[in-house]
Amino acid sequence: MKNEAFQECYPDDLSHCYGCGKNNHEGHHLKSYWHGQQTIAHFTPESYHTAIPGFVYGGLIASLIDCHGTGSAAAMAFRNEDRAMDTLPAIRFVTGALNVNYLAPTPQGVELELMGSFSEIKARKIIVDIVVSANGVVCAKGTVIAVKMPQSMAIKT
């Protein structure tokens, strides 16, 4: 199996997300990978991701949890179908609900680690629990209820 990020396997027409889309030049470009039975992503906030000097804006944390969660859900769906993520038809998930708990201030200038685990896996809904840490300190925990992308969101060509 290739060690490509989940998001690198998305087809071009489904790669515009601000958080993880390879076709969004202004976005975060978050990349998620398998880490055993969990998923992992790393992200280093820029100076403009500031809430107050020295600390990261909470909205950034929420967007990272969101994108790592939906990417992880897609990866699990492909794994459950025993096929590679770059095969068609594409399976994409969108956020049905997002819950974030901020547990400690997130320091600026430190690489963040996001670890995802799965608490529910169904055909159309996958719940992913994400832990965000900086320098080994848990800063936030989030839950993403990821639902299969509705056909109405598909790009019409």
Image (cartoon, grey):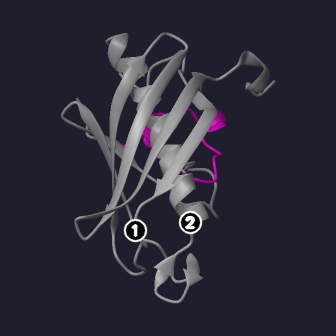
Residue 37 position within the rendered picture, expressed as x and y whole percent measured from the top left: 22, 30
The CA distance from mark 2 to mark 1 is 11 Å
Residue drawn at the location 46% of the way across and 12% of the way down: 122
**Secondary structure type for disc 2:** helix
Magenta span contains residue 7: yes
Going by the numbered disc 2, the residue's amino acid type is: Gly
Can residue 130 be spotted in the picture?
yes
Locate the N terminus by quadrant: top left
Residue drawn at the location 62% of the way across and 31% of the way down: 94
Q: Nearer the viewer, residue 56 or 70?
A: 56
Residue 47 position within the rendered picture, expressed as x and y whole percent measured from the top left: 52, 83
Residue 32 position within the rendered picture, expressed as x and y whole percent measured from the top left: 38, 45
- Stretch in magenta: 5-19
Magenta span contains residue 114: no
Residue 65 lies, with reference to residue 51, above or below; the image says: above
| Left or right, 36 with reference to 47 | left
**Secondary structure type for disc 1:** loop
- Check disc 1 and report the residue beneath it: 104
Q: Residues within 10 Å of mark 2 (few under 14, many from 20)?
A: some
Q: Quadrant of residue 81?
A: top left
Residue 126 position within the rendered picture, expressed as x and y whole percent measured from the top left: 47, 22
Can residue 157 be spotted in the picture?
no
| Left or right, 3 with reference to 87 | left
Residue 83 lies, with reference to residue 66, above or below; the image says: above
- Check disc 2 and report the residue beneath it: 58
